[in-house]
Image (tube, rainbow, N blue to C red):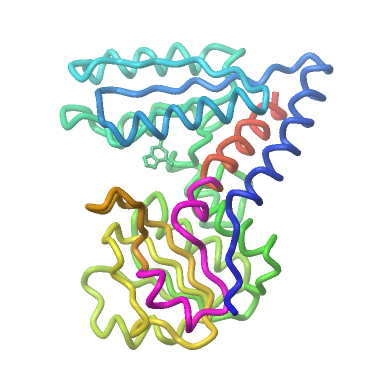
Amino acid sequence: MAQLIDGKKISTEIKEALKLEVAQLKEKGTDCVLAVIQVGEDPASKVYVRNKKRACEFIGIESISYELPEETTQEELLQIIDKLNADSKVKGILCQLPLPKHINEDTVIKRISPQKDVDGFHPENVGALVIGQKGFVSCTPFGIIQLLKKSNIEIDGKQCVIVGRSNIVGKPMALLMLRENATVTVCHSHTKNLKEITKTADILIVAIGKPKFINHEYVKDGAVVIDVGIHRQENNKLCGDVDFDSVLPKVSAITPVPGGVGPMTIAMLMHNCVEGSKNY
Ligand code: GUN
């Protein structure tokens, strides 16, 4: 029987612990304040932002919302970020991606102070991860490491294959798995013989944004499968990048969608906010 990796349960445990920590910080006079910026009306972003604000409320982190219209100029957005960078009360700044096309995401990410970049997207934080120094780590890959550790899945010495090379998930995931002493392979849309490579994985992490792309033909017997994707199907149900029913008989452990990786992303964002608040 495969182990179902329960991201909902593990994330709740993490958030409960953070709630205590935030209360202790408050007693010492440190408030945790997160600024959440959304530009435009992307429906998925709205759901993510709402969930992030709810998690803040649960933990006792104050969230300040900026819901800006689609027409907001890059300069206006940068000015808001400058103001938040300078506000000592604000410990974390999050600008929900994607941004409208007329705004350059790299410019915006770079403008957020690395000390307040709770998403871990700033080049300084990414660089710190590359060379093994302290810094904020991107929440989804960081959450996957916590899922594996809390599920007692050994990483050290294991063959890890990551499918997807995004800046938010694939690349930082590779660096984190390397830090945990896995042997890491990163596959992407130009990879030849994808199936042969994924079948070598002890731990297979999939973040490609294609519903049910990975079926049993891509998976080795006994592998651990981590599914980062989330898609709404025609029948209104959610599914991941992995065809869950197809791979289930083969795997030793797997994350469900929903209730796997998703809740961990938000828990790690909260973790980063609390860590950021401690640095003041
Ligand atoms: N868009 C998709 N994932 C993320 C995330 O983790 N952070 C932000 N800011 N935007 C996102």
For residue 172, above or below residue 65: below
Position of 163 with respect to 52 (left or right) is left
Q: Is residue 68 magenta?
A: no
Q: Is residue 255 magenta?
A: yes
Q: Residue at x 45, y 67 (%)?
A: 205
Front residue of 264 and 118: 264
Front residue of 95 and 251: 251
Q: Residue at x 43, y 62 (%)?
A: 227
For residue 203, above or below residue 280: below
Position of 21 with respect to 48 (left or right) is right
Q: Position of residue 179 (x, y in %)?
A: 60, 65
Q: Position of residue 159 (x, y in %)?
A: 52, 81
Q: Residue at x 65, y 21 (%)?
A: 32
Question: The C terminus is located in which quarter?
Answer: top right
For residue 51, above or below residue 170: above
Residue at far front of view = 235
Q: Which residues are magenta?
A: 243-263
Q: Position of residue 125 (x, y in %)?
A: 51, 43
Q: Quadrant of ligand 1?
A: top left
